[in-house]
Amino acid sequence: MLPTESLLARIISRPLPLGLTLLTLGLSACNSGNAPTDPAQATAQATGPVTASSKTFVYDGQDHSWTGAATPASGLTTLSLDPGDNNLTIEPWTAASNGWGPIEKDRSNGDDVAGDGTTLTINGQAFARGFGVHAGSSMTFTLGGKCSTFTAQVGVDDEVGNQGSVVFQVWDGTATKLYDSGTLRGSDVPKAVSVNVGGVQNLRLVVTDAGDGLSYDHADWASPMLACSAGATTGSNIKYSGPIVIRKGGTYSGNWENTLSQSAVLIQTSEPVIIENSNIRSRGNLISGFKNRLTVRNTRGYALNPNVAGRAAGRAVNAEEVMSLRVENSYFEGTTGIYARAFMGNSSAGDTIKILRNRFKNTDGRLSNGAGGYNGSYSVVQAILFNNVKRVPNVEIGWNEIINEPGKSRTEENMNFYVSSGTPTSPFLIHDNYIQGAYGMAPATETTYAGGGILLGDGKVSNPLDSGYARVYDNQIVGTTNHGIAIAGGVNNQMYNNRVISSGRMPNGQRLPAANVGLYVWDPTGAGKLSPATFASNRMDNNVVGWTRVDAAGNTSNNPTWFPNCGLNATSCVGNQNLGTVTLAAEQQEYTRWQDKLSAKNVKVGP
Protein backbone atom coordinates (compact mmCIF):
# COMPACT_ATOMS: atom_id res chain seq x y z
CA MET A 1 0.00 0.00 0.00
CA LEU A 2 1.20 3.49 -0.78
CA PRO A 3 2.75 5.31 2.16
CA THR A 4 0.69 8.33 1.15
CA GLU A 5 -2.63 6.57 0.53
CA SER A 6 -4.40 9.00 2.80
CA LEU A 7 -2.93 11.87 0.85
CA LEU A 8 -4.11 10.40 -2.45
CA ALA A 9 -7.55 9.89 -1.03
CA ARG A 10 -7.70 13.50 0.02
CA ILE A 11 -6.57 14.76 -3.34
CA ILE A 12 -8.65 12.54 -5.56
CA SER A 13 -11.82 13.16 -3.58
CA ARG A 14 -11.11 16.85 -3.20
CA PRO A 15 -13.66 19.46 -4.30
CA LEU A 16 -13.35 20.82 -7.82
CA PRO A 17 -9.83 22.22 -8.33
CA LEU A 18 -9.41 25.98 -7.91
CA GLY A 19 -7.95 26.73 -10.80
CA LEU A 20 15.55 21.88 -16.06
CA THR A 21 17.31 23.30 -13.84
CA LEU A 22 19.88 20.54 -14.25
CA LEU A 23 23.27 19.85 -12.77
CA THR A 24 25.63 22.65 -13.72
CA LEU A 25 28.60 21.21 -15.55
CA GLY A 26 31.02 23.90 -14.50
CA LEU A 27 32.23 24.38 -18.06
CA SER A 28 31.19 28.01 -18.50
CA ALA A 29 33.89 30.53 -19.19
CA CYS A 30 35.25 32.50 -16.27
CA ASN A 31 35.05 35.75 -18.24
CA SER A 32 32.52 37.26 -20.60
CA GLY A 33 33.64 38.44 -23.99
CA ASN A 34 32.97 38.50 -27.69
CA ALA A 35 34.22 35.79 -29.98
CA PRO A 36 37.29 36.55 -32.08
CA THR A 37 36.28 37.76 -35.53
CA ASP A 38 38.51 35.09 -37.02
CA PRO A 39 40.50 32.18 -35.56
CA ALA A 40 43.79 34.05 -35.68
CA GLN A 41 42.57 36.50 -33.05
CA ALA A 42 42.15 33.78 -30.43
CA THR A 43 44.89 33.56 -27.81
CA ALA A 44 45.92 30.13 -26.53
CA GLN A 45 47.28 29.69 -23.04
CA ALA A 46 49.97 27.29 -24.23
CA THR A 47 53.03 28.75 -25.98
CA GLY A 48 54.76 27.81 -29.18
CA PRO A 49 53.43 26.27 -32.39
CA VAL A 50 52.62 22.61 -32.65
CA THR A 51 53.55 20.91 -35.89
CA ALA A 52 51.37 18.27 -37.47
CA SER A 53 53.98 15.62 -36.83
CA SER A 54 54.02 16.38 -33.10
CA LYS A 55 50.26 16.07 -32.66
CA THR A 56 49.39 12.98 -30.69
CA PHE A 57 46.07 14.23 -29.26
CA VAL A 58 46.76 12.22 -26.10
CA TYR A 59 46.20 14.08 -22.84
CA ASP A 60 49.59 14.64 -21.17
CA GLY A 61 48.38 15.82 -17.77
CA GLN A 62 49.14 19.48 -18.56
CA ASP A 63 46.59 22.27 -18.63
CA HIS A 64 45.89 23.19 -22.25
CA SER A 65 42.54 24.84 -21.57
CA TRP A 66 41.52 28.14 -23.13
CA THR A 67 39.04 30.86 -22.21
CA GLY A 68 37.60 33.39 -24.66
CA ALA A 69 39.02 36.89 -24.37
CA ALA A 70 37.07 39.24 -22.13
CA THR A 71 35.93 42.68 -23.25
CA PRO A 72 35.38 45.83 -21.18
CA ALA A 73 31.60 45.50 -21.61
CA SER A 74 29.99 44.19 -18.47
CA GLY A 75 26.70 43.11 -20.04
CA LEU A 76 25.78 40.54 -22.63
CA THR A 77 25.14 41.54 -26.22
CA THR A 78 22.11 40.07 -27.97
CA LEU A 79 22.97 38.60 -31.34
CA SER A 80 22.11 40.60 -34.46
CA LEU A 81 19.83 37.92 -35.81
CA ASP A 82 17.73 38.30 -38.93
CA PRO A 83 14.38 36.66 -39.63
CA GLY A 84 14.89 33.20 -41.09
CA ASP A 85 18.02 31.06 -40.90
CA ASN A 86 21.19 32.45 -39.29
CA ASN A 87 24.64 30.86 -39.36
CA LEU A 88 25.87 30.83 -35.79
CA THR A 89 29.55 31.01 -36.73
CA ILE A 90 29.23 34.65 -37.79
CA GLU A 91 27.71 35.68 -34.45
CA PRO A 92 29.66 36.72 -31.32
CA TRP A 93 29.61 34.55 -28.26
CA THR A 94 29.30 36.06 -24.81
CA ALA A 95 31.34 33.40 -23.03
CA ALA A 96 33.55 30.59 -24.28
CA SER A 97 35.98 28.02 -22.97
CA ASN A 98 37.73 25.01 -24.47
CA GLY A 99 39.49 21.96 -23.08
CA TRP A 100 42.55 22.14 -25.34
CA GLY A 101 43.60 25.22 -27.27
CA PRO A 102 41.22 27.84 -28.66
CA ILE A 103 37.86 27.16 -30.22
CA GLU A 104 38.20 27.33 -33.99
CA LYS A 105 35.70 28.79 -36.42
CA ASP A 106 35.08 26.92 -39.69
CA ARG A 107 37.90 24.45 -39.02
CA SER A 108 38.69 21.61 -36.67
CA ASN A 109 40.16 22.12 -33.20
CA GLY A 110 43.71 21.15 -34.20
CA ASP A 111 45.99 21.56 -31.20
CA ASP A 112 47.18 24.30 -28.84
CA VAL A 113 47.36 27.34 -31.11
CA ALA A 114 44.85 29.33 -33.12
CA GLY A 115 44.36 28.41 -36.74
CA ASP A 116 46.04 24.98 -36.57
CA GLY A 117 42.95 22.96 -37.51
CA THR A 118 41.79 21.71 -40.89
CA THR A 119 38.45 21.37 -42.70
CA LEU A 120 35.67 20.21 -40.42
CA THR A 121 35.13 16.56 -41.35
CA ILE A 122 32.95 13.91 -39.66
CA ASN A 123 33.14 10.33 -40.95
CA GLY A 124 34.30 11.52 -44.35
CA GLN A 125 31.71 14.29 -44.69
CA ALA A 126 33.22 17.79 -44.94
CA PHE A 127 31.53 20.93 -43.66
CA ALA A 128 32.38 24.51 -44.63
CA ARG A 129 30.99 26.18 -41.52
CA GLY A 130 31.02 25.33 -37.86
CA PHE A 131 33.04 25.24 -34.64
CA GLY A 132 35.93 22.92 -33.89
CA VAL A 133 36.15 22.36 -30.14
CA HIS A 134 37.75 20.02 -27.61
CA ALA A 135 36.05 18.50 -24.57
CA GLY A 136 35.24 20.09 -22.20
CA SER A 137 34.07 23.15 -23.98
CA SER A 138 31.28 25.68 -23.61
CA MET A 139 30.01 28.48 -25.83
CA THR A 140 27.24 30.87 -24.78
CA PHE A 141 25.22 32.99 -27.22
CA THR A 142 22.62 35.53 -26.15
CA LEU A 143 19.55 34.99 -28.33
CA GLY A 144 17.21 37.45 -26.63
CA GLY A 145 14.30 35.08 -27.25
CA LYS A 146 14.37 35.72 -30.99
CA CYS A 147 14.79 32.16 -32.20
CA SER A 148 12.72 29.01 -32.47
CA THR A 149 15.09 26.22 -33.53
CA PHE A 150 18.80 25.37 -33.31
CA THR A 151 20.11 22.79 -35.78
CA ALA A 152 23.55 21.31 -36.41
CA GLN A 153 25.44 18.17 -37.43
CA VAL A 154 27.69 16.93 -34.65
CA GLY A 155 30.41 14.36 -34.25
CA VAL A 156 34.10 13.64 -33.63
CA ASP A 157 36.41 15.17 -36.23
CA ASP A 158 38.25 12.83 -38.58
CA GLU A 159 41.62 14.33 -37.60
CA VAL A 160 41.66 11.90 -34.64
CA GLY A 161 40.68 8.87 -36.72
CA ASN A 162 38.39 6.44 -34.92
CA GLN A 163 39.54 7.68 -31.52
CA GLY A 164 37.76 10.02 -29.11
CA SER A 165 34.45 9.93 -27.25
CA VAL A 166 32.36 13.02 -26.52
CA VAL A 167 28.85 14.12 -25.59
CA PHE A 168 27.20 17.17 -27.16
CA GLN A 169 24.70 19.12 -25.08
CA VAL A 170 22.48 22.14 -25.69
CA TRP A 171 21.48 24.17 -22.64
CA ASP A 172 19.15 27.04 -21.81
CA GLY A 173 21.79 29.01 -19.92
CA THR A 174 23.08 26.99 -16.99
CA ALA A 175 19.64 25.92 -15.81
CA THR A 176 17.98 23.54 -18.24
CA LYS A 177 19.48 20.99 -20.59
CA LEU A 178 17.56 20.94 -23.86
CA TYR A 179 19.50 18.22 -25.69
CA ASP A 180 22.02 15.45 -25.04
CA SER A 181 23.55 13.46 -27.89
CA GLY A 182 24.73 10.54 -25.83
CA THR A 183 28.29 9.31 -26.40
CA LEU A 184 29.63 9.80 -29.95
CA ARG A 185 32.92 8.28 -31.10
CA GLY A 186 35.37 8.82 -33.92
CA SER A 187 33.84 6.00 -35.94
CA ASP A 188 30.31 7.44 -35.81
CA VAL A 189 28.55 9.23 -38.64
CA PRO A 190 27.36 12.83 -38.07
CA LYS A 191 24.32 13.11 -35.82
CA ALA A 192 21.60 15.59 -36.70
CA VAL A 193 20.57 17.97 -33.92
CA SER A 194 17.29 19.90 -33.92
CA VAL A 195 16.38 21.65 -30.67
CA ASN A 196 13.43 23.88 -29.88
CA VAL A 197 14.91 27.12 -28.43
CA GLY A 198 11.74 29.21 -28.34
CA GLY A 199 11.99 31.75 -25.54
CA VAL A 200 15.62 30.91 -24.76
CA GLN A 201 17.68 33.93 -23.74
CA ASN A 202 21.15 32.37 -23.48
CA LEU A 203 21.98 29.39 -25.65
CA ARG A 204 24.89 27.34 -24.34
CA LEU A 205 26.63 24.66 -26.43
CA VAL A 206 28.61 22.19 -24.33
CA VAL A 207 30.86 19.23 -25.14
CA THR A 208 31.94 16.83 -22.39
CA ASP A 209 34.51 14.03 -22.44
CA ALA A 210 31.91 11.24 -21.93
CA GLY A 211 33.59 10.44 -18.63
CA ASP A 212 36.74 8.77 -20.00
CA GLY A 213 39.28 11.58 -20.22
CA LEU A 214 40.29 14.21 -22.79
CA SER A 215 42.43 12.23 -25.22
CA TYR A 216 41.39 12.58 -28.89
CA ASP A 217 38.18 14.43 -27.92
CA HIS A 218 38.00 16.75 -30.96
CA ALA A 219 34.36 17.63 -31.53
CA ASP A 220 32.65 19.50 -34.37
CA TRP A 221 29.51 21.62 -34.25
CA ALA A 222 29.05 21.53 -38.03
CA SER A 223 26.58 23.78 -39.89
CA PRO A 224 25.15 25.35 -36.71
CA MET A 225 22.02 27.32 -37.64
CA LEU A 226 19.39 29.31 -35.79
CA ALA A 227 15.88 29.76 -37.18
CA CYS A 228 14.72 33.12 -35.89
CA SER A 229 11.76 35.48 -36.14
CA ALA A 230 11.63 39.17 -36.90
CA GLY A 231 11.18 40.14 -33.27
CA ALA A 232 11.99 38.82 -29.84
CA THR A 233 9.85 35.95 -28.64
CA THR A 234 9.94 36.70 -24.95
CA GLY A 235 7.26 38.79 -23.33
CA SER A 236 9.63 41.48 -22.07
CA ASN A 237 10.76 43.32 -25.20
CA ILE A 238 7.63 43.39 -27.32
CA LYS A 239 5.56 46.52 -27.81
CA TYR A 240 2.12 45.70 -26.47
CA SER A 241 -1.21 47.40 -26.89
CA GLY A 242 -3.82 47.24 -24.17
CA PRO A 243 -6.38 44.46 -23.66
CA ILE A 244 -8.89 43.59 -26.38
CA VAL A 245 -12.55 42.55 -26.29
CA ILE A 246 -13.60 40.44 -29.29
CA ARG A 247 -17.32 40.64 -30.10
CA LYS A 248 -17.32 39.34 -33.66
CA GLY A 249 -15.92 36.23 -35.29
CA GLY A 250 -12.81 36.46 -37.45
CA THR A 251 -9.04 36.19 -37.37
CA TYR A 252 -7.10 38.40 -34.98
CA SER A 253 -3.35 39.02 -34.63
CA GLY A 254 -1.63 41.41 -32.29
CA ASN A 255 0.32 41.98 -29.09
CA TRP A 256 -2.00 42.51 -26.13
CA GLU A 257 -1.44 42.90 -22.42
CA ASN A 258 -3.39 43.65 -19.29
CA THR A 259 -1.49 45.17 -16.40
CA LEU A 260 -4.45 44.52 -14.11
CA SER A 261 -5.48 41.10 -12.84
CA GLN A 262 -7.94 40.74 -15.71
CA SER A 263 -8.02 39.07 -19.11
CA ALA A 264 -5.83 40.42 -21.89
CA VAL A 265 -8.14 38.94 -24.53
CA LEU A 266 -11.85 38.62 -23.68
CA ILE A 267 -14.07 36.87 -26.23
CA GLN A 268 -17.78 37.71 -26.22
CA THR A 269 -19.09 35.84 -29.25
CA SER A 270 -19.90 32.26 -30.18
CA GLU A 271 -18.85 32.94 -33.77
CA PRO A 272 -15.57 31.24 -34.71
CA VAL A 273 -12.57 33.29 -33.53
CA ILE A 274 -8.96 32.62 -34.56
CA ILE A 275 -6.09 34.19 -32.63
CA GLU A 276 -2.81 33.63 -34.43
CA ASN A 277 0.75 34.98 -34.62
CA SER A 278 0.23 36.96 -31.44
CA ASN A 279 1.96 37.76 -28.17
CA ILE A 280 -0.10 38.05 -25.01
CA ARG A 281 0.77 38.78 -21.41
CA SER A 282 -1.35 39.58 -18.41
CA ARG A 283 -1.67 39.66 -14.64
CA GLY A 284 -4.96 37.83 -15.19
CA ASN A 285 -6.08 35.26 -17.76
CA LEU A 286 -4.41 35.59 -21.14
CA ILE A 287 -7.50 34.52 -23.14
CA SER A 288 -10.93 34.06 -21.60
CA GLY A 289 -14.59 33.73 -22.51
CA PHE A 290 -17.91 31.87 -22.29
CA LYS A 291 -19.56 29.83 -25.04
CA ASN A 292 -16.75 30.43 -27.52
CA ARG A 293 -15.57 28.65 -30.64
CA LEU A 294 -11.90 29.47 -30.37
CA THR A 295 -8.72 28.58 -32.23
CA VAL A 296 -5.34 29.72 -30.90
CA ARG A 297 -2.25 29.04 -32.98
CA ASN A 298 1.34 30.24 -33.32
CA THR A 299 0.90 32.43 -30.27
CA ARG A 300 3.09 33.12 -27.25
CA GLY A 301 1.60 33.82 -23.84
CA TYR A 302 3.22 34.94 -20.60
CA ALA A 303 1.57 35.18 -17.20
CA LEU A 304 2.73 37.98 -14.92
CA ASN A 305 2.61 37.96 -11.14
CA PRO A 306 -0.95 39.16 -10.36
CA ASN A 307 0.33 41.54 -7.68
CA VAL A 308 -2.92 40.89 -5.84
CA ALA A 309 -2.35 39.19 -2.50
CA GLY A 310 -3.65 35.63 -2.45
CA ARG A 311 -4.19 35.33 -6.19
CA ALA A 312 -2.46 32.94 -8.61
CA ALA A 313 -1.36 33.70 -12.14
CA GLY A 314 -3.93 33.69 -14.91
CA ARG A 315 -4.83 30.85 -17.23
CA ALA A 316 -3.41 30.55 -20.70
CA VAL A 317 -6.90 29.85 -22.02
CA ASN A 318 -10.00 29.97 -19.83
CA ALA A 319 -12.82 28.36 -21.85
CA GLU A 320 -16.03 28.26 -19.83
CA GLU A 321 -19.05 26.41 -21.27
CA VAL A 322 -16.83 25.75 -24.23
CA MET A 323 -18.38 25.27 -27.67
CA SER A 324 -15.17 24.33 -29.50
CA LEU A 325 -11.50 24.78 -28.72
CA ARG A 326 -8.30 24.27 -30.68
CA VAL A 327 -4.89 25.32 -29.32
CA GLU A 328 -1.99 24.55 -31.64
CA ASN A 329 1.73 25.33 -31.94
CA SER A 330 1.73 27.89 -29.16
CA TYR A 331 3.93 28.63 -26.13
CA PHE A 332 2.73 29.43 -22.60
CA GLU A 333 4.92 30.35 -19.65
CA GLY A 334 4.07 30.85 -16.00
CA THR A 335 0.33 30.41 -16.53
CA THR A 336 -2.18 28.23 -14.70
CA GLY A 337 -2.81 26.27 -17.85
CA ILE A 338 -5.62 25.58 -20.30
CA TYR A 339 -9.01 25.15 -18.62
CA ALA A 340 -12.06 23.76 -20.43
CA ARG A 341 -15.37 23.49 -18.55
CA ALA A 342 -18.81 22.14 -19.45
CA PHE A 343 -18.72 21.34 -23.16
CA MET A 344 -21.76 22.84 -24.89
CA GLY A 345 -20.81 22.52 -28.55
CA ASN A 346 -22.43 20.62 -31.40
CA SER A 347 -20.35 17.50 -31.87
CA SER A 348 -22.23 16.48 -35.02
CA ALA A 349 -21.17 19.78 -36.60
CA GLY A 350 -17.51 19.18 -35.73
CA ASP A 351 -17.24 21.03 -32.44
CA THR A 352 -14.65 19.38 -30.18
CA ILE A 353 -11.39 20.10 -28.28
CA LYS A 354 -7.89 19.65 -29.70
CA ILE A 355 -4.68 20.72 -27.94
CA LEU A 356 -1.76 19.91 -30.21
CA ARG A 357 1.98 20.64 -30.51
CA ASN A 358 2.21 23.29 -27.79
CA ARG A 359 4.94 24.06 -25.27
CA PHE A 360 4.15 24.81 -21.63
CA LYS A 361 6.78 26.08 -19.22
CA ASN A 362 6.29 26.36 -15.45
CA THR A 363 2.60 25.92 -14.75
CA ASP A 364 2.40 28.04 -11.62
CA GLY A 365 -0.29 27.99 -8.94
CA ARG A 366 1.74 29.93 -6.36
CA LEU A 367 -0.22 32.75 -4.74
CA SER A 368 1.04 36.29 -4.99
CA ASN A 369 1.96 38.32 -1.93
CA GLY A 370 0.79 41.46 -3.70
CA ALA A 371 4.30 42.84 -4.04
CA GLY A 372 5.84 40.83 -6.87
CA GLY A 373 6.59 37.74 -4.77
CA TYR A 374 4.67 34.78 -3.33
CA ASN A 375 3.04 34.17 0.04
CA GLY A 376 3.86 30.46 0.47
CA SER A 377 0.40 29.13 -0.42
CA TYR A 378 -1.00 27.88 -3.71
CA SER A 379 -4.05 27.10 -5.81
CA VAL A 380 -4.57 23.64 -7.32
CA VAL A 381 -3.82 24.06 -11.03
CA GLN A 382 -2.91 21.94 -14.03
CA ALA A 383 -1.34 22.56 -17.41
CA ILE A 384 -4.44 21.03 -19.00
CA LEU A 385 -7.64 20.62 -16.97
CA PHE A 386 -11.01 19.33 -18.20
CA ASN A 387 -13.97 19.92 -15.88
CA ASN A 388 -17.31 18.31 -16.77
CA VAL A 389 -16.33 17.87 -20.40
CA LYS A 390 -18.66 14.90 -20.92
CA ARG A 391 -19.39 12.58 -23.84
CA VAL A 392 -17.36 14.55 -26.38
CA PRO A 393 -16.03 12.73 -29.45
CA ASN A 394 -12.90 13.54 -31.48
CA VAL A 395 -10.97 15.06 -28.57
CA GLU A 396 -7.19 14.94 -29.05
CA ILE A 397 -4.31 16.11 -26.87
CA GLY A 398 -1.03 15.26 -28.54
CA TRP A 399 2.60 16.23 -29.11
CA ASN A 400 2.66 18.80 -26.31
CA GLU A 401 5.82 19.52 -24.30
CA ILE A 402 5.23 20.43 -20.65
CA ILE A 403 8.25 21.26 -18.48
CA ASN A 404 8.14 22.50 -14.89
CA GLU A 405 11.11 23.68 -12.85
CA PRO A 406 11.36 23.50 -9.04
CA GLY A 407 11.02 26.88 -7.40
CA LYS A 408 9.44 28.41 -10.50
CA SER A 409 6.22 26.39 -10.70
CA ARG A 410 3.55 24.71 -8.62
CA THR A 411 1.22 22.27 -10.38
CA GLU A 412 -0.76 19.23 -9.33
CA GLU A 413 -1.35 16.78 -12.16
CA ASN A 414 -0.03 18.20 -15.39
CA MET A 415 -3.13 16.78 -17.07
CA ASN A 416 -6.35 16.10 -15.15
CA PHE A 417 -9.73 14.99 -16.51
CA TYR A 418 -12.30 15.75 -13.82
CA VAL A 419 -15.76 14.23 -14.42
CA SER A 420 -14.99 14.10 -18.13
CA SER A 421 -15.35 11.52 -20.88
CA GLY A 422 -15.08 10.71 -24.51
CA THR A 423 -17.55 8.29 -26.07
CA PRO A 424 -17.48 4.51 -26.47
CA THR A 425 -16.81 4.89 -30.21
CA SER A 426 -14.57 7.99 -29.99
CA PRO A 427 -12.51 8.09 -26.78
CA PHE A 428 -10.21 10.96 -25.81
CA LEU A 429 -6.82 10.48 -27.52
CA ILE A 430 -3.99 11.66 -25.24
CA HIS A 431 -0.76 10.69 -26.94
CA ASP A 432 2.85 11.55 -27.68
CA ASN A 433 3.16 14.21 -24.99
CA TYR A 434 6.36 14.93 -23.05
CA ILE A 435 5.78 15.89 -19.40
CA GLN A 436 8.70 16.73 -17.12
CA GLY A 437 8.44 17.81 -13.51
CA ALA A 438 5.69 18.38 -10.94
CA TYR A 439 6.92 20.08 -7.79
CA GLY A 440 5.51 21.40 -4.54
CA MET A 441 6.27 24.75 -2.97
CA ALA A 442 9.39 23.44 -1.21
CA PRO A 443 10.28 20.19 -3.02
CA ALA A 444 13.55 19.65 -1.17
CA THR A 445 11.79 19.41 2.21
CA GLU A 446 8.14 18.49 1.61
CA THR A 447 7.40 14.86 2.43
CA THR A 448 3.87 14.86 1.01
CA TYR A 449 2.75 16.27 -2.32
CA ALA A 450 -0.02 15.20 -4.70
CA GLY A 451 1.33 16.34 -8.06
CA GLY A 452 1.85 14.02 -10.99
CA GLY A 453 1.76 13.49 -14.72
CA ILE A 454 -1.65 12.37 -16.06
CA LEU A 455 -4.70 11.44 -13.98
CA LEU A 456 -7.85 9.86 -15.44
CA GLY A 457 -11.15 9.39 -13.63
CA ASP A 458 -10.94 12.20 -11.08
CA GLY A 459 -14.33 12.79 -9.42
CA LYS A 460 -17.21 10.41 -8.73
CA VAL A 461 -20.13 9.98 -11.13
CA SER A 462 -23.26 7.81 -11.18
CA ASN A 463 -23.59 7.43 -14.96
CA PRO A 464 -20.85 5.31 -16.60
CA LEU A 465 -20.90 7.55 -19.69
CA ASP A 466 -19.84 10.62 -17.68
CA SER A 467 -16.29 9.57 -16.75
CA GLY A 468 -13.83 7.60 -18.83
CA TYR A 469 -13.43 6.50 -22.43
CA ALA A 470 -9.90 7.85 -22.73
CA ARG A 471 -6.75 6.45 -24.35
CA VAL A 472 -3.39 7.55 -22.95
CA TYR A 473 -0.50 6.14 -24.99
CA ASP A 474 3.01 6.81 -26.28
CA ASN A 475 3.63 9.59 -23.73
CA GLN A 476 6.83 10.26 -21.77
CA ILE A 477 6.44 11.23 -18.12
CA VAL A 478 9.60 12.25 -16.25
CA GLY A 479 10.19 13.16 -12.61
CA THR A 480 6.65 14.13 -11.62
CA THR A 481 7.16 13.38 -7.89
CA ASN A 482 3.99 11.81 -6.44
CA HIS A 483 2.97 9.74 -9.45
CA GLY A 484 3.53 9.36 -13.15
CA ILE A 485 0.21 8.22 -14.61
CA ALA A 486 -2.87 7.00 -12.78
CA ILE A 487 -6.45 5.78 -13.08
CA ALA A 488 -8.71 6.76 -10.17
CA GLY A 489 -12.14 6.21 -11.69
CA GLY A 490 -14.16 6.02 -14.84
CA VAL A 491 -15.06 3.33 -17.34
CA ASN A 492 -12.93 2.05 -20.21
CA ASN A 493 -9.93 4.25 -19.48
CA GLN A 494 -6.79 2.81 -21.04
CA MET A 495 -3.16 3.75 -20.40
CA TYR A 496 -0.61 1.80 -22.44
CA ASN A 497 2.78 2.05 -24.18
CA ASN A 498 3.87 5.02 -22.06
CA ARG A 499 7.36 5.65 -20.64
CA VAL A 500 7.18 6.74 -16.98
CA ILE A 501 10.43 7.36 -15.09
CA SER A 502 11.78 9.20 -12.08
CA SER A 503 15.12 9.21 -10.28
CA GLY A 504 13.57 10.58 -7.09
CA ARG A 505 15.69 13.69 -7.49
CA MET A 506 15.29 17.24 -8.69
CA PRO A 507 17.27 18.28 -11.78
CA ASN A 508 20.00 19.73 -9.53
CA GLY A 509 20.48 16.34 -7.85
CA GLN A 510 18.67 17.06 -4.58
CA ARG A 511 16.37 14.28 -3.49
CA LEU A 512 12.59 14.55 -3.61
CA PRO A 513 11.28 13.35 -0.22
CA ALA A 514 7.73 13.20 -1.64
CA ALA A 515 8.65 10.86 -4.52
CA ASN A 516 6.04 8.12 -4.54
CA VAL A 517 4.95 5.77 -7.36
CA GLY A 518 5.12 5.45 -11.13
CA LEU A 519 1.74 3.89 -12.00
CA TYR A 520 -1.33 3.42 -9.87
CA VAL A 521 -4.84 2.07 -10.36
CA TRP A 522 -7.14 2.72 -7.43
CA ASP A 523 -10.84 3.30 -6.77
CA PRO A 524 -10.72 5.71 -3.81
CA THR A 525 -14.37 6.81 -4.01
CA GLY A 526 -15.92 3.34 -4.21
CA ALA A 527 -17.28 3.97 -7.71
CA GLY A 528 -16.70 0.32 -8.53
CA LYS A 529 -19.38 -0.68 -5.99
CA LEU A 530 -22.12 1.46 -7.52
CA SER A 531 -24.85 -0.04 -9.67
CA PRO A 532 -24.05 0.45 -12.43
CA ALA A 533 -20.36 0.61 -11.58
CA THR A 534 -18.49 3.75 -12.66
CA PHE A 535 -15.08 2.21 -12.09
CA ALA A 536 -14.87 -0.65 -14.58
CA SER A 537 -13.06 -2.13 -17.59
CA ASN A 538 -9.99 0.06 -17.15
CA ARG A 539 -6.56 -0.88 -18.44
CA MET A 540 -3.03 -0.07 -17.28
CA ASP A 541 -1.03 -2.36 -19.55
CA ASN A 542 2.35 -2.58 -21.27
CA ASN A 543 3.95 0.59 -19.96
CA VAL A 544 7.68 1.01 -19.31
CA VAL A 545 8.19 2.30 -15.78
CA GLY A 546 11.07 3.02 -13.45
CA TRP A 547 10.33 4.93 -10.25
CA THR A 548 13.08 5.40 -7.69
CA ARG A 549 12.91 6.90 -4.22
CA VAL A 550 15.90 8.25 -2.30
CA ASP A 551 15.93 8.33 1.50
CA ALA A 552 17.67 10.91 3.69
CA ALA A 553 20.81 8.75 3.82
CA GLY A 554 20.99 8.52 0.04
CA ASN A 555 19.77 4.92 -0.17
CA THR A 556 17.51 4.09 -3.10
CA SER A 557 14.41 1.90 -3.41
CA ASN A 558 12.04 1.37 -6.29
CA ASN A 559 8.27 1.77 -6.33
CA PRO A 560 7.13 1.39 -9.93
CA THR A 561 3.46 0.39 -9.40
CA TRP A 562 0.60 0.36 -6.91
CA PHE A 563 -2.44 -1.60 -8.10
CA PRO A 564 -4.95 -2.13 -5.25
CA ASN A 565 -7.91 -2.27 -7.65
CA CYS A 566 -6.58 -4.15 -10.63
CA GLY A 567 -9.07 -6.92 -11.29
CA LEU A 568 -12.04 -4.86 -10.07
CA ASN A 569 -14.85 -5.01 -12.64
CA ALA A 570 -12.60 -6.39 -15.40
CA THR A 571 -9.83 -3.83 -14.84
CA SER A 572 -6.46 -5.03 -16.22
CA CYS A 573 -2.86 -4.26 -15.16
CA VAL A 574 -0.52 -6.51 -17.14
CA GLY A 575 2.70 -6.37 -19.12
CA ASN A 576 4.22 -3.35 -17.40
CA GLN A 577 8.02 -3.41 -17.62
CA ASN A 578 10.02 -2.35 -14.56
CA LEU A 579 13.28 -0.57 -15.44
CA GLY A 580 14.64 -0.85 -11.89
CA THR A 581 16.70 1.94 -10.39
CA VAL A 582 16.56 5.17 -12.39
CA THR A 583 19.41 7.70 -12.33
CA LEU A 584 19.27 11.41 -12.98
CA ALA A 585 21.27 10.79 -16.15
CA ALA A 586 18.52 8.45 -17.36
CA GLU A 587 15.96 11.19 -16.75
CA GLN A 588 18.06 13.63 -18.74
CA GLN A 589 18.42 11.17 -21.59
CA GLU A 590 14.64 10.97 -21.83
CA TYR A 591 14.51 14.49 -23.23
CA THR A 592 16.96 13.47 -25.94
CA ARG A 593 14.63 10.58 -26.75
CA TRP A 594 11.82 13.11 -27.09
CA GLN A 595 13.85 15.33 -29.41
CA ASP A 596 14.80 12.34 -31.55
CA LYS A 597 11.15 11.33 -31.71
CA LEU A 598 10.09 14.77 -32.90
CA SER A 599 12.82 14.75 -35.52
CA ALA A 600 11.92 11.27 -36.75
CA LYS A 601 8.23 12.16 -37.02
CA ASN A 602 8.94 15.65 -38.44
CA VAL A 603 6.77 17.27 -35.78
CA LYS A 604 7.27 20.93 -34.89
CA VAL A 605 6.29 21.82 -31.31
CA GLY A 606 5.57 25.41 -30.34
CA PRO A 607 5.28 28.51 -32.54
Image (cartoon, helix red, strand yellow):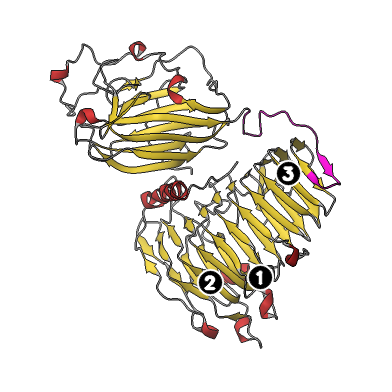
x then y, percent, for residue 102: 31, 20
Q: Secondary structure at mark 3?
A: strand
Viewer-proximal residue among 180 and 480:
180
Please report the residue visible at 25 percent of the width from the left and 22 percent of the height from the top. Answer: 110
Magenta part of the protein: which range?
Answer: 231-250
Query: Is any atom of residue 78 visible in this view?
Result: yes
Query: Is any atom of residue 315 visible in this view?
Result: no
Q: Secondary structure at mark 1?
A: loop
Residue 23 lies in what quarter of the image?
top left
Outermost residue, left side: 53
Please report the residue visible at 39 percent of the width from the left and 50 percent of the height from the top. Answer: 584
Badge 2 density bin: few <14, some 14–19, many ≥20, Cα 10 Å: many
Q: Secondary structure at mark 2?
A: strand
The label number, if any, that marks residue 275 in the structure image = 3
Identify the image quadrant of the C terminus: top right
Q: Is residue 238 magenta?
A: yes
Residue type of the residue flagged with mark 3: Ile
Residue type of the residue flagged with mark 1: Ser
Side of 223 where 537 appears, left or right: right
Residue hosting label 1: 421
Q: Is residue 446 magenta?
A: no
x then y, percent, for residue 9: 59, 72
In this rendering, is residue 540 above or below 366? below
x then y, percent, for residue 456: 59, 68
Q: Earlier in the sequence, mark 2 or mark 1?
A: 1
